[in-house]
Amino acid sequence: MVLWIILAALTAAVAAILILPFARATKTASVDRAGEVAVYRDQLAELDRDRAQGLINAEEAEYARAEIGRRLLAAAGAGEGRETAAPKARKYALATAVVTMVPPVVGLCLYLALGNPGLPDQPLEARLANPGNNVALLVAKAERHLAENPKDGAGWDLLAPIYFRSMRLGDAELAYRNAIRILGPNPVRLAGLGETLVASNDGIVTEDARSVFEQAMKLDPDNPRSRFYVGLGFEQAGRAAEARAQFEAIAKGSPPDAPWMQLVNQHIAKNGGTITPGRDTAPAPGNPSPADVAAAENMSRGDRQAMIRGMVDSLAERLKQDPNNLEGWVRLIRSYSVLGDKPKAEEALKSGLKQFPSSGELVALANEMGLAVEGVAQ
């Protein structure tokens, strides 16, 4: 309670400091003007004495009287104006007092009614013992446990993907490596470590990352996730034939309606391959059909821009209904960037990363286009 008394005293002191100048200014001005009027009246009396003694002639006396009279009237009028302004100053002082005092008083009353001033601070130990749904406390609790039990592989295995989703990439790499060292490698841990390394290098599949994905492929040869990154690593290294072989193997082992087929077919074509007929050869979402292209040739520039904007908006709407489409998110982000709509490009990138949090391609796209997204290093 002592704290509240101190705060109340400080609030009252601040209010007094703010209100005092209004009262002081009015009093000072009234005293100054009264003294000035008295001086001018004394000057008139002295002028009459000088005139009676013949020290100045009549003409000079009239000029001096007129000037002193003018100053006397001006001083008297200013004094009356000040007296008229005094009520306004009091109103300002009252308003200042209300604005200064009412919010703290209302806040204090609400806190006393709704809060619990007597509740002691809860130490970290108690909060860690009962973290509830607080993810930060859950992570802190797990970190404390692992600091005391560094050989708990299950703890590292649990914490690694949480670090990755939070873009704490250095911690994620350490956690994955500890889990692999203690529990042994498996496809999920290896793929997680590989994607962490890719994200740490702005979407580049380094030799270290590709080696990790290749280990995951040996344990699970049919995993398209690891195969894709191996192929992407070959593509980035300029080894087109090996990259094409990886992407074609993914296409061959995937169902025709797999959500990753559009992206895989794009990389097959990029590396000089031919897309297998019947395997998702429809235009990618947002791409114009031949009829659209023909119609656009006869449009004005404004109409053509409106058509493009309509197609981009249509793609965005389809992705809201079916967000499991990495190629669609990549195309939408690029489309907004081309249209110069950077806020929407960043919004689309955030949505894509929520749907595909481990996508090295989206991380690379963010850095390529200079898009500022929370959790993505620029």
Image (cartoon, rainbow, N blue to C red):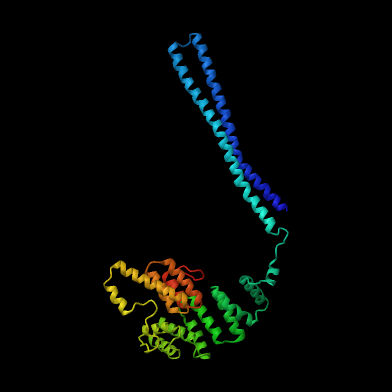
Against 146, is 59 above or below? above
The vertical placement of 26 against 140, above or below, is above
User: Which is nearer the eye, 306 or 365?
Assistant: 306
Vertical placement of residue 282 versus 342, above or below: below
Residue name at image x 52 percent, y 78 percent: 196
Kindly identify the residue that appears in the image at 57 percent across and 37 percent down: 89
Residue 170 at what x, y percent from top left? 55, 74
Figure label count? 0
Residue at the top extreme?
A: 53
**Residue drawn 52% across and 83% down?**
191
**What x and y, as percent, mark residue 223?**
50, 88
Where in the figure is residue 153, as x and y percent of width and height? 63, 82
Can residue 238 be seen here? The reply is: no
**Extreme residue toward the left, this view:** 298
Q: Give above or below for 3 relative to 51.
A: below
For the point 52% across and 21% down, which residue is it? 40
Q: Is residue 320 visible?
A: yes
348 left or right of 186?
Answer: left
Relative depth, front residue between 114 and 217: 114
On the image, which quarter does residue 336 sit in?
A: bottom left
